[in-house]
Image: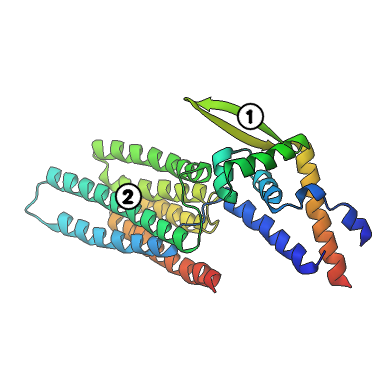
Amino acid sequence: MENKEVIDTLSEIRDMMAKSSKVLSLSGLSCALVGVLALLACGAAQYVLSNPSWMHYQKVSILTTLALILLVICAATVFLFARYKAKKNNYRFTFDQTSRRMLWNFAIPLITGGILCIGLIHQAHYGLTSSMMLIFYGLALINLSSYTFSSTKYLGYAQVILGLIDFMAVNHSLIFWAIGFGVCHIIYGILFYFLKERKGER
Amino acid sequence: MNLSLEHINKAFESKVRLGIMSALMVNEEIDFTTLKSLLDLTDGNLASHTRSLEELGYIQSKKQFIGRKPNTTFQMTESGKAAFSEHLKALEDFLKISLGN
């Protein structure tokens, strides 16, 4: 047996282990784009909040709708970029065991946090929602990191820490939200794209 | 060098079987369809390889029905784990020795 043959075999084994247990089609660019969308949404939210002509309850319903629209657009962005990346790299892109497991583990903290936030809004604790979103989203990312690129956990840690600081500091919710969902996503997405994806292509 | 070659398992010389074992090494269990798309194989091809690995006692299958569709999942056995680990170690040892020379 040749050396090269053995090296190839070992790398095939490693690739198969990674491919079968992790979803590798998530794209760094979509992460950065999600960050940009989040910043735009923050701008819109700031505009709504500072507009004196709307009543309080109107603002709440506008912001909630805005958040839901943002969520759908972001999910679609991540999905479409992942499909494109899978096609380009000849990865399989199916709703199989591996991707189901990834989505489920990402969803558990996210749904828990989502229900908590609905409860908080319902009880008019608006200031707490941003920190809860950051904390639970961060936990979801940390959970996700076992099922996709492990570096997503660092983005998760950043979100959790920001969420906790936001929880302590009163009245700056939107800024923390913008840093967490906007700036952090953009930085992580760009770093990931240049350090991991571009490198891998070469 | 001969010593480490002895431990290289003939059962894992086929790429497909190596792929099946690698995937099962890091997953508790994998169903037939997922394994098929991972390895990019036809039903018959995958079935013949899983059957021979089952006969060797390296993997075990579990058949169940989801609605009306039959669904087979595969798991690695303890002896499969041991055999594959030994195979991996043999490959690594082979590299170490030949790179050392």
Label 1 sits on a secondary structure element that is strand
B63 sits to left or right of A26: right
The crowd level at tag 1 (other Cα within 10 Å; few <14, some 14-19, many 20+) is few
Residue B69, image x and y in percent?
50, 29
Residue at image point 48% right, 25% down:
B68
Q: Which of B58 and A44 is in front in this view?
A: B58
Residue at image point 42% right, 51% down:
A164
Q: Which of A55 and A91 is in front in this view?
A: A91
Judged from this view, the residue extending furthest toward the front is: B44
A2 sits to left or right of A186: right
Quadrant (top left, top right, bottom left, bottom right) of the N terminus of chain A: bottom right
Q: Which chain carries label 1?
A: B
The amino acid type found where label 2 is placed reads Ser
Residue A78, image x and y in percent?
38, 56
Residue at image point 57% right, 49% down:
B38
- Residue B64 position (above or below residue A124): above
- Residue B26 position (above or below residue B55): below
Residue corresponding to mark 1: B62
The amino acid type found where label 1 is placed reads Lys
Label 2 sits on a secondary structure element that is helix
A120 sits to left or right of B62: left
Q: Which of A78 and B59 is in front in this view?
A: B59
Residue B26, image x and y in percent?
65, 46
Q: Mark 2 lies on which chain?
A: A
Calculate the distance from the C-alpha at mark 2 to the C-alpha at mark 1: 46 Å
Task: Specify the quadrant of the image occupied by residue B33.
Answer: top right
Q: Residue A130 carries which label?
A: 2
The crowd level at tag 2 (other Cα within 10 Å; few <14, some 14-19, many 20+) is many
